[in-house]
């Protein structure tokens, strides 16, 4: 059973850039890494997905180094509404090489 | 696109009764869906993998006779909590596997179950 590893919590002031790093040492060759955002009493919401190097969309950037054993979610200029739990995840499913939900990172944005 | 719905959004039931939760992919077909359970301030725990037209695959420690899963169509999977007890009270979330090759999960909004 392989899980991702992330910092349990982070605090940031409004307007700052936030970088959350996730370790996934057992990622398989063909696996993509996906990041989700979850608010209380809601299902996780897709943020961004990548395989290697850098991916950017309208809400975030994702950096994955060449060895792909980690990934970093970058949120530019966070606001109070970005306060949530952020999870990195590999493909779903059973099996030792699949990545299950880890603890996630609870981001608190401070005014 | 890639919207997943769940019904009901919350349910309160008496101990010993059964509760059915529906998970639907609204704008895409999903041969594979997943059911998760989440306790307060904890992460999501995968309960089972639901495959259209075949039996579900349950994670270790999840009782298949307790949590019945049916995936009768490409857009609907149901989870039935049989003979529910207070310890089954939790937040149940489903996800559907999107198309496109990257195995992206799209999650439903969750169902809050309270067993009295």
Image (cartoon, coloured by chain):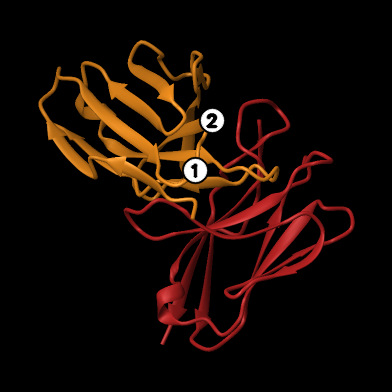
Chain colours: A red, B orange
Numbered mark located on residue B32 in the image: 2
Q: Is residue B49 above or below residue B108?
A: above
Q: Position of residue B100 (x, y in %)?
A: 67, 45
Q: How many marks?
A: 2
In the picture, measured across the screen, residue A27 lies left or right of residue A77, that is right
- Residue designated by label 1: B28
Residue positioned 51% across, 35% down in the render:
B30
In the picture, measured across the screen, residue A102 lies left or right of residue A49, that is left
Report in which chain the residue with disc 2 lies.
B
Q: Position of residue B61 (x, y in %)?
A: 47, 19
In the picture, measured across the screen, residue B86 lies left or right of residue B72, that is left
Report in which chain the residue with disc 1 lies.
B
* Circles 2 and 1 in contact, beta carbons < 8 Å: no
Residue positioned 47% across, 30% down in the render:
B74
Residues at marks 2 and 1, CA–CA distance in whole angstroms? 12 Å
Front-most of B100 and A107?
B100
Q: Position of residue B105 (x, y in %)?
A: 55, 44
Closer to viewer: mark 2 or mark 1: 1
Q: Quadrant of the C terminus of chain B?
A: top left
- Mark 1 falls on what kind of element? loop
For label 1, count other residues whose C-alpha is less than 10 Å away and answer few (under 14), some (14-19) or many (20+). some
In the picture, measured across the screen, residue A38 lies left or right of residue A12, that is left
- Mark 2 falls on what kind of element? strand
Q: Position of residue B63 (x, y in %)?
A: 40, 15
């Amino acid at each position: 059973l392989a899980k991702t590893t992330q910092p349990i919590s982070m605090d940031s002031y409004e307007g700052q850039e936030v970088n959350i790093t996730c370790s996934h040492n057992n990622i398989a060759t063909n696996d993509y890494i996906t990041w989700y955002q979850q608010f209380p009493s809601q299902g996780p919401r897709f943020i961004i997905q990548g395989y290697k190097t850098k991916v950017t969309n309208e809400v975030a950037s994702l950096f994955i180094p060449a060895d792909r054993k980690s990934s970093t979610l970058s949120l530019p200029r966070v606001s109070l509404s970005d306060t949530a739990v952020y999870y990195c995840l590999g493909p779903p499913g059973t099996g030792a090489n699949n990545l299950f939900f880890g603890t996630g990172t609870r981001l608190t944005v401070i005014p | 696109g890639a919207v997943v719905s769940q019904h009901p959004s919350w349910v309160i039931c008496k101990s010993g009764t059964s509760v059915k939760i529906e998970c639907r992919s609204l704008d895409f077909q999903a041969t594979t869906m997943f059911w998760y359970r989440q306790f307060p301030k904890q992460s999501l725990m995968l309960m089972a993998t639901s495959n259209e037209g075949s039996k579900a695959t349950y994670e270790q420690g999840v009782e298949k006779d307790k949590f019945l899963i049916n995936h009768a169509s490409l857009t609907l999977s149901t989870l039935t909590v049989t003979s529910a007890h207070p310890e089954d009270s939790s937040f149940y979330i489903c996800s559907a596997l999107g198309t496109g090759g990257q195995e992206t999960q799209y999650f439903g909004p969750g169902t809050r179950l309270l067993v009295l």
